[in-house]
Image (cartoon, helix red, strand yellow):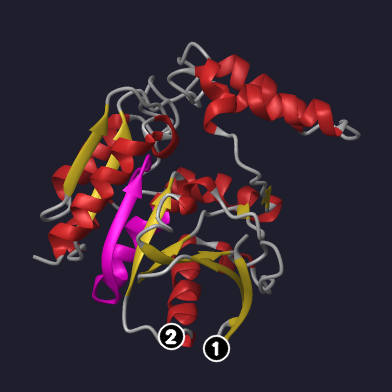
Amino acid sequence: MWERNLITTVRGEFEVFAKGEGTPLCVTHHYSEFNETGDYFAESFTQRNRVYLVNLREAGSSEKAVHPYQLSMLETILDLEAIRESLALDQWGFAGHSTGGMLGVIYGIYFSDKLSFNVIVGAAAREYMTFSNDCIYNPEHPHFSRMQELMDSLKHPNLSVEKKRDLKVQRTKLSLYYPDKYEEYFSLDISKGMSAIRLNFFSREVHIFDVTKKLPMITTPTLVICGRHDVQCPIEYSKEMGESIPNATLAIFDRSNHYPFLEEADQFYATYLSFVEGLAK
């Protein structure tokens, strides 16, 4: 189980879960709600780092938003910086998957000097749906209709626990290279929720999200990872980041979709370990 803490900052109080020993590493996701059971992505780093898993504003027991703009990506990074300062850390690493990786991009642009390194997995530096037929949220994608059907079904009131779990499993399988391995990948006793208000704000903000011209401003060592078959944030966006972030390392996983840290877990950890150990040389 993860250790639960309430961190008081100049921007409010935030719920932070901690696990592992080593150099400090911040992990979060833009609209997930974490608890003591942790998170599959965050768990990937606990062998090497002291991982701080952060519930953002309006997630879990963290501070509420007084104004809508406080749910934006930039404001979220300012909250993370306040947490780092309250923990009395001069620097920490950051690792984010999917929308968490998008936060990592913003973090690197504005606060590279506060990051010892940055790991961006299955993410993008701009809106990723409109111009890529490889994205499952693009109407031209062959599984677009099925994904929309599952998402609409999950919104229905009075769903049984069993039915909701089944729908979520089906939705996740659409983002796996080997869907039949779902039970193998997601075998730990880990559960998490979702902040609807954060998701709703992101669903609007993402349509005007594009920081590609600012990627050269990222000076912290950056590892960009993507599954070759990622249907959520297609590989072209990771390649774009790998080419535009100075001295970035790009790693592509050939037998992964959106979850390389589970689909090719051993290779993922070896790649991460090689990256961070290389920084010490």
Q: Is residue 13 visible?
A: no
SS type, badge 2 = helix
Whichever of labels 1 and 2 marks the residue nearer the N terminus, that label is: 1
* Residue 245, visible in the rendered structure: yes
Q: Residues within 10 Å of mark 2 (few under 14, many from 20)?
A: some
Q: Residue 117: within the magenta?
A: yes
Residue 225 locus on image (x, y percent): 29, 41
* Picture quadrant of residue 229: top left
The residue depicted at 68 percent of the width and 53 percent of the height is 195
> Which quadrant of the figure contains the C terminus?
bottom left
Does 145 sit above or below residue 43?
above
Identify the residue position indicated by label 1 in the image: 10
Residue furthest to the right: 158
Q: With respect to residue 191, does 239 lie above or below? A: above
Is 252 in front, or is 47? 47
Q: Nearer the viewer, residue 30 or 177?
A: 177
Q: Gap in Å between the C-alphas at discs 1 and 2?
A: 9 Å
Residue 205, horizontal then vertical, whole percent: 51, 51
Return the x and y of residue 119 as percentages of the image width and height: 31, 54
Q: State the count of labels.
A: 2
User: Image quarter for residue 81?
Assistant: bottom left
- At x 24% / y 44%, what residue is drawn? 271
Q: Amino acid at mark 1?
A: Val
How crowded is the residue under tag 1: few (<14 C-alpha within 10 Å), some, or many (20+)?
A: few
Please tell me the numbered disc located at residue 85.
2
Q: Quadrant of the N terminus?
A: bottom right
Magenta stretch holds residue 23: no
Discs 1, 2 touching: Cβ within 8 Å: yes
Q: Which residues are magenta?
A: 102-125
Is residue 83 rendered to the left or right of residue 134?
right
Residue 166 point in image, percent of width and height: 73, 24
